[in-house]
Image (cartoon, rainbow, N blue to C red):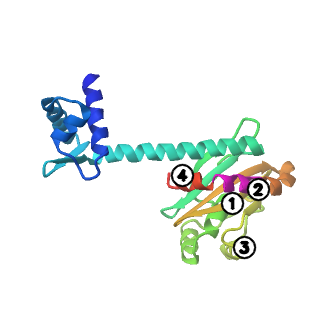
Amino acid sequence: MGSVQRAMRLLECVAGHAYGAPAKQLARETGLALPTAYHLLRTLVHEGYLRRDKGLFFLGDAAVRLSSTSAQQKRRSTMVDALAQWRDAIGVPVYYAQYGDGEIEVVCVSDTPGNPAVHEWADFRETGHAHAIGQCLLSQLDEEARRDHLDRHPVRAITPYTVPDSHSLLRRLDQAGRMAPVTERQEYALGTVCAAIPITVGTTAATMALSLPLHQADRLPSAVRQLQAEIGRLLGSLALSISI
């Protein structure tokens, strides 16, 4: 345990020197005997947590990966906490999804037994034309990217209410506006209405969405307004979380 603690002290010390530091300086700043510092530094270099260049020590690739993973976990935690807060405040299931590498990905879902999320009975990635999440993400893409997506995932009937063809879908997306909320009624799941709010940070197309049972459809407009207001209050934190 003592060796681990000393190694961590060295890593933290190296992290504080953007332009690197020599072993003697690191030993002095961490209060370690020089032979001990040398031994631990060599081990950390061997394991990839540090690298040595012209007598100076820098963080290595392994340490950078650890830092990146920790940051991603923190951003994801921020997103999960926000969704849970909105779920409880509005009383509906809340979803976060984004478009990346040509595919729709539902990243986080927050629901409760009393207000369950929509069951993914048909692959969300392949049925983006039929649900509010997919339509919202597609609305943020340019025409070429939309057509590419629909070439790979053609429009097909999911329910009797599904948009009938790609031409109708593209016309709907053009009329909706790139950053306007998208709603759909029973197009993906019978007995369910959904709405999705577009969020764009940099080049990432993303969306927050919610769903309600059909008999509560009259709640949809007010729930959307409430979710928009909640998103506005946390937009800074959300911007950091978009890249999870």
Element type at mark 3? helix
Vertical order, 75 against 175 (above or below): above
Q: Tell me: 129 left or right of 100.
A: right
**From mark 3 to mark 4, how far is it between C-alphas?**
29 Å
The magenta stretch spans residue 225: yes
Dot 4, crowdedness within 10 Å: few (<14), some or many (≥20)? many
The amino acid type found where label 4 is placed reads Ser
Q: Residue at x 71, y 37 (%)?
A: 112
Q: Are marks 2 and 3 in contact (CB under 8 Å)?
A: no
Vertical order, 22 against 9 (above or below): below
**From mark 2 to mark 3, how far is it between C-alphas?**
19 Å
**From mark 4 to mark 1, how far is it between C-alphas?**
16 Å
Quarter of the picture holding the N terminus:
top left
**From mark 4 to mark 2, how far is it between C-alphas?**
21 Å
On the image, numbered disc 2 is attached to which residue?
224
| Residue 172: mark in rendering | 3
Q: Are marks 2 and 1 in contact (CB under 8 Å)?
A: yes
On the image, numbered disc 1 is attached to which residue?
197
**From mark 3 to mark 1, how far is it between C-alphas?**
16 Å
In the image, which is nearer the foreground, mark 4 or mark 2?
Answer: 4
Dominant secondary structure of the residues highlighted in magenta in the image:
helix
Q: Mark 2 vs mark 3: which is more N-terminal?
A: 3
The amino acid type found where label 1 is placed reads Ile
**From mark 2 to mark 1, how far is it between C-alphas?**
8 Å
Q: Residue at x 71, y 43 (%)?
A: 87
